[in-house]
Amino acid sequence: MKRSLFRLVLGLSVAMVCSGALHARSAPLAAPAASNAAPKFEVDPFWPKPLPHNWVLGQAPSVFVDAQDHVWIITRPRTLTRNDIGASLTPQTSECCVPAPPVIEFDENGNVLQAWGGPGKGYEWPETEHGITVDHKGNVWIGGSGGRDRQILKFTNDGKFLLQIGHQLPESQKNAANSADTDNLAAPANMLVDAKTNEVYVADGYVNRRVIVFDADTGHYKRQWGAYGNPPEDGAPRTRDPKSVPSQQFNIVHSIKMSNDRTVYAIDRYNNRVQLFTPDGKFLREAFIARDTTDSRGTASDVAFSPDRDQRFLYVADAANYKIRILDRATLQVLGSFGRQGYYAGQWHWLHGLATDSKGNLYTSESQGNRVQRFVVK
């Protein structure tokens, strides 16, 4: 009886294997990916490596990945308190730490390659560091968001000064807007350099309300525009109401990027939107990000693109909601999001800057979290 039962069970098992009933269990097949599936990311808690020289980071508003997949950040050493930098004081009050220089370059593995920056001869260093960009020639551009900052600076890759566009204002004229001024900026937040035309586009920014373009070698003015391609109006209200007609003016032009198809993305932070333009400033369309959010940090702080040729995905840093929104770049439809507030690896305290490398990994910088993180695409 037992032998007959064993043969019956064995026969049924063989039949099920031959028919495929047990095949999925013994050798599972991967389901095909959905055509609109958003990529997944996982934080790399060991990137970057510990900083050398007893350094500590101040606020880290911006991050950029260059053509060699090197990661650049700009920091604000002056935001550190005496308790943070006891080792640098005279007399020394503690064993830790020393302020890191404002500009730091990391390799892919998170090692510091070089660091430099700060006040120097021949240029006006911003009072509040903000944006950083590396152009197609390897030159490094920085901007500042302080009330007196009316300039952007261009340096060689190793920190030799090359060019200044605009000049700081005296304290008595701090926070004065003038979007008609084509020689000076007003708290410029960030920049991009177009390799095809050798032009620098400036998100100008915190005080002015425009995108402005200069020759990247001479600094000569080329053109400018406001929201929807309108002339910028400094006196327009900065209040926002999610239920009302969208503002016809930029609120804060916080960052600016250009895609492979030469579409210019102007990030209008406090209006919770990203506006798309041609390089000449013709308005194309816009995408609102969590428009009903009224938090003062806004929901569009920076954007980055996936590294495929068509740059299918658009990533948007939502500072107010502590998320990265993943959009289909063609339709501007939100496909997903990830993240939350916090101080642990993979969380953010004031998510501010965003960049991608050639492998599709994401890098984030935090204005008040004082750190840069890497999220590996899965």
Image (cartoon, rainbow, N blue to C red):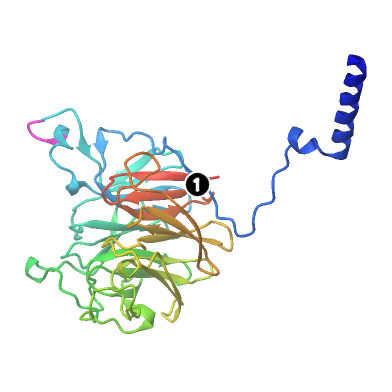
Q: Quadrant of residue 151?
A: bottom left
Q: Which residue is mark 1?
A: 41
Relative vertical location of residue 13 with respect to residue 106 in this rendering, above or below:
above
Relative vertical location of residue 376 with respect to residue 246 in this rendering, above or below:
above
* Camera-side residue of 111 and 232: 232
Residue neighbourhood size for the residue with mark 1, other residues' Cα within 10 Å, grouped as few (<14), some (14–19), many (≥20): some
The residue furthest bottom is: 231
Relative vertical location of residue 368 with respect to residue 92 in this rendering, above or below:
below
Q: Name the residue type under label 1.
A: Phe
Q: Quadrant of residue 216?
A: bottom left
- Where does the magenta region start and end? 88-92
Could you say where residue 57 lies in the image, as x and y percent from the top left?
Answer: 26, 42
* Camera-side residue of 156 and 57: 57
* Camera-side residue of 22 and 146: 22
Could you say where residue 38 lies in the image, as x and y percent from the top left?
Answer: 55, 55
For the stretch drawn in magenta, the main secondary structure is: loop
Instruction: Kindly identify the residue that appears in the image at 58 percent across and 64 percent down.
Output: 310
The quarter of the picture where the N terminus appears is top right
Could you say where residue 169 lies in the image, as x and y percent from the top left?
Answer: 13, 68
The quarter of the picture where the C terminus appears is top right
* Camera-side residue of 266 and 109: 266
Residue 270 appears in the picture as rendered? yes
Queried whether the magenta region covers residue 143, the answer comes back as: no
Q: Secondary structure at mark 1?
A: strand
Residue 198 appears in the picture as rendered? no
- Along the horizontal axis of the image, is 352 left or right of 87? right
